[in-house]
Amino acid sequence: MSHKIHLWSAKTPELQKELPGHPIGIASLTFTPDGKKFASAGFDRTLKLWDVATGEELLRFRRVLRHSLPAPLFTPRLGPLRTRPWWSRRSSRGLSLANDRERATHAVAGSEHETHALNLFRVSRSWHGPRCRAGPKSRMMVSAISSRESGVPEADPMAVPTPRAIPVEPTEAPSNGAIPPLENGDRLTRAEFERRYEAMPELKKAELIEGVVHMPSPVRQRYHGRQHSHLNFWLCAYEGSTPGVEVGDNSTVRLDLDNMPQPDCLFFIQPEHGGRVRIGEKDYIEGAPDLVAEVASSSASYDLGDKLKAYRRNGAREHVVWRVLDRQIDWFVLHAERYKPLNPAADGILRSTVFPGLWLDPAALMRGDVNAVFAMVQQGLNSPEHTDFVARLAGEKVTATKLTKLGYLDKKP
């Protein structure tokens, strides 16, 4: 995410000016209709007014924004600067600051300065919200807290000079009292993410990764759905002969205060058999599963980025990612707080270090040969190490009453 503002020429690919912008990222931009000034809104909750010709910062309004992604508007009459609540915005999907694909990288501004354009904000995933907009007849922008101040006040001392997303708690609800919907790219706390997700029963999948909401695109059958089913089949085949372990399919996981993923498949030792996870009162998994399995298009997927880091930091012991377009299966094992690739044995088989007997023939899985995948699982289930593992799980079994007292299970209402 860029913290600086770049003014480009629309006629020639030349950078005209580079302005300092905001210390922790820029959310949106608005030009005045005459193109002589523009306002920028930052994630540090400040608004700044800039002169296009000189690049000078004319005004700065500190801690006046009430939403995580405001879109400032110049009013058509003298009056305060307005910001539209993010839940009332409608915007096109994608990476642009404009409303159409033609203006995706250059938001042309104003009649007098129509040679200037802005290339301000780019992210590596779909985004709802930021776009360039201004009223048709406005000629003045007035401070939301003081319309007569001039100059640039001191920088906000509360601003944090880091590019990391800042999750925010809700500060305002829509006028009709409804809970705001989740939108791709929202920066929320886990509690607020849960509140909005639970208010959208029609939504089947959403994740909070490092404080940012991710809402996947519709699932394709040949590039995700089929692979997901085969991963689930592989884990279920092992679960059927291993009392004390449990498979999850798209189960929500409370990892930490900034992360609430919903992995394609997960696998864990049950709490009553000595497992580390906890089943909360809302039936969410709390803590990192022992194994997580995801289907991703390629190495560019966030499954191998921020999400992988979050699982590592919270102690998920094994992480499997099937990169469909790359025709590759990555199996990572947590060692000394870092993920290291699990290399196949001489026979080409991957063997879990957490679940003895959980064996995978990656070539068979990728070609869709479920019979060969099942046959390999059966070989693992017949191994001496799996027999020892089942005996160990049985010895660890404790009663649900004891688990409730220890805090691993919540009492059901």
Image (tube, rainbow, N blue to C red):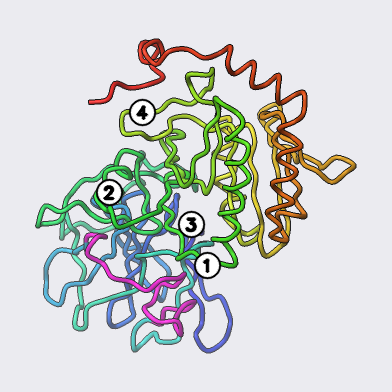
Q: Nearer the viewer, residue 411 or 276?
A: 411
Nearer to us of marks 2 and 4 is 4
Residue at numbered disc 1: 220
State the CA–CA distance, disc 1 to disc 4.
32 Å
Q: Is the Cβ of the residue at disc 2 closer than 8 Å to that at disc 4? A: no
Q: Nearer the viewer, residue 363 or 198?
A: 363
Residue 36 figure quarter: bottom left
Circle 2: is it few (<14), some (14-19), or many (20+) Cα within 10 Å? some
Secondary structure of the residue carrying numbered label 4: loop
Report the residue at 74% width, 34% height from top: 380
Q: Position of residue 72 (x, y in %)?
A: 26, 65
Q: Residue at x 56, y 13 (%)?
A: 396
Seen at 71% across and 34% down, the residue is 352
Nearest the eye: 53 or 111: 111
Query: In the image, which is nearer the foreground, mark 2 or mark 1?
Result: 1
The quadrant in which residue 257 appears is top left
Q: CA distance from mark 2 to mark 4?
A: 18 Å
Name the residue: 72% across, 38% down: 378
Q: Earlier in the sequence, mark 2 or mark 4?
A: 2
Q: Are marks 1 and 3 in contact (CB under 8 Å)?
A: no
In the image, residue 67 above or below residue 130: above
Q: Position of residue 398 (x, y in %)?
A: 47, 12
- Residue 236: % across, % down: 57, 41
The residue that mark 3 highlights is 3
Instruction: Point out the stretch of residues depicted in magenta.
Output: 85-108
Give amino acid for label 3. Answer: His
Q: Is residue 148 left or right of residue 150?
A: left
Q: CA distance from mark 1 to mark 3?
A: 35 Å
Please provide percent x and percent y for residue 161: 47, 43
> Label for residue 196?
2
Q: Residues within 10 Å of mark 3 (few under 14, many from 20)?
A: many
